[in-house]
Amino acid sequence: MTDRQSQLAAPPGRRRVLLGSALVAASGLMFALAGMGIKMAEESLSSFEVLFWRNVLSLAILAPWVLWHWPRSLRPAHRGLMAMRGVALVAALLCYYHAVSVLPLAEAVLLNFSAPIFVPVLGFLLFRFALDGRVLAAVLIGFAGVALILKPGTEFFQPAALIGAASGVLGGLSAVAIWKMPTEENPIRIAVYFALIGILVTLAPVLMNPTVPPAEAWPGLVMLGVFSTAAHVLFAKGSLIAPTDRVGTFIYTSVVFAALFGWLFWDEGLDWLMAGGAVLIVAAGVIAIRAGRPGRDQVS
């Protein structure tokens, strides 16, 4: 066997882990930029309208790939998981978009990125993924972090934060679906199906008030369409080429970028409760992700 063949036959090495980490970190920046687009667009549009036009733009961006690879481009490796992931993510983003419009950007992003702490529980309930002590500890730490951000029983509590937390739960469900998918699934096909499902789900509410978005909404919509599409493709690609337990934690760069953008453009600050919650959620996410990719060790 040649050196080249040995490299191909070996498990994912340092280069693949570095590349996967870079792709996931880049997706974190894209998610934060997309969050800026949401905040801008929702000044004049509803969450349903923003998500509808986001998916229309995303599908337009991905259309050349669909046509080039037609008809294989629309043949998923697992239809059920693709549908489950798409519906869960649409619901998660509707919650997230509303949270972004009323909460500080970093807080909304952080609640949305609490998804990893819900993955173990949802994976166990739906697919009998194994649970161990580290995973359970991550779940408890993560719940404590979410509680600090929600601030229940204090004058700082906002009901909208509960919707932001719901986006994390639903995002966890979509993550379970994508991690359960066969590894040969194409990340661009995943993004295409999400856009199609998103258009179908949001079409009826948009048709109830069929108007073209005003001029001031288009910069935010274009930012959202471009950067969110890039974020999903980069994250899926990074997770597929390198072990999720090695690279998944880099998605939390999005929280740092969101805090920076919120401070620069909307003069948003951080309070101590939110900072403490952020530390706990990130720590819980790191523990949960490093505990292993769901599905590798399942309960028989």
Image: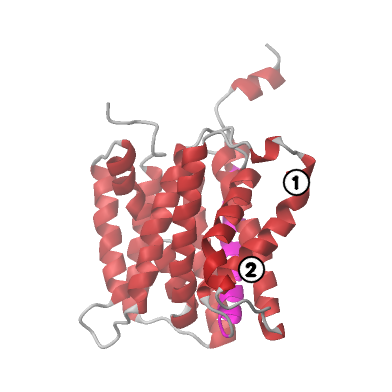
Mark 2 surroundings within 10 Å by alpha-carbon count, few (fewer than 14), some (14 through 19), many (20 or more): many
* Secondary structure state at the residue bearing disc 1: helix
- Which secondary structure dominates the residues rendered in magenta? helix
Q: Residue 290 sits in which quadrant?
A: top left
Give how far apart the Cα atoms at labels 1 and 2 are: 19 Å
Residue 99, image x, y percentages: 44, 75
As for residue 17 lying within the magenta part, the answer is: no
Q: Name the residue: 49% across, 80% down.
A: 101
Q: Nearer the viewer, residue 297 or 138?
A: 297
Name above or below for residue 255 compared with residue 184: below
- Pointer 1 local density, CA inside 10 Å: few below 14, some 14–19, many at least 20: some
Q: Quadrant of the C terminus?
A: top left
- Residue 178 at what x, y percent from top left? 48, 43
The amino acid type of the residue labelled 2 equals: Trp
Measured as percent of width and height from the top left, residue 185 is found at 58, 36
Q: Secondary structure at mark 2?
A: helix
Query: In the rendered image of this protein, does residue 116 appear above or below residue 70?
Result: below
Q: Nearer the viewer, mark 1 or mark 2?
A: 2
Q: Is residue 31 magenta?
A: yes
The residue carrying mark 1 is 65
Count of numbered marks = 2
Q: Quadrant of residue 180?
A: top left
Residue 129 in view = no
Place of residue 5 in the rendered image (x, y in percent of width and height, measured from the top left) = 68, 18
Q: Is residue 4 left or right of residue 228?
A: right
Q: Nearer the viewer, residue 115 or 280?
A: 115
Question: In the image, which residues are magenta?
Answer: 18-43
Q: Is residue 158 above or below residue 186?
A: below
For disc 2, the marked residue is 53
Considering every residue shown, the one lying at the far left of the view is 153
Q: Nearer the viewer, residue 163 or 276?
A: 163
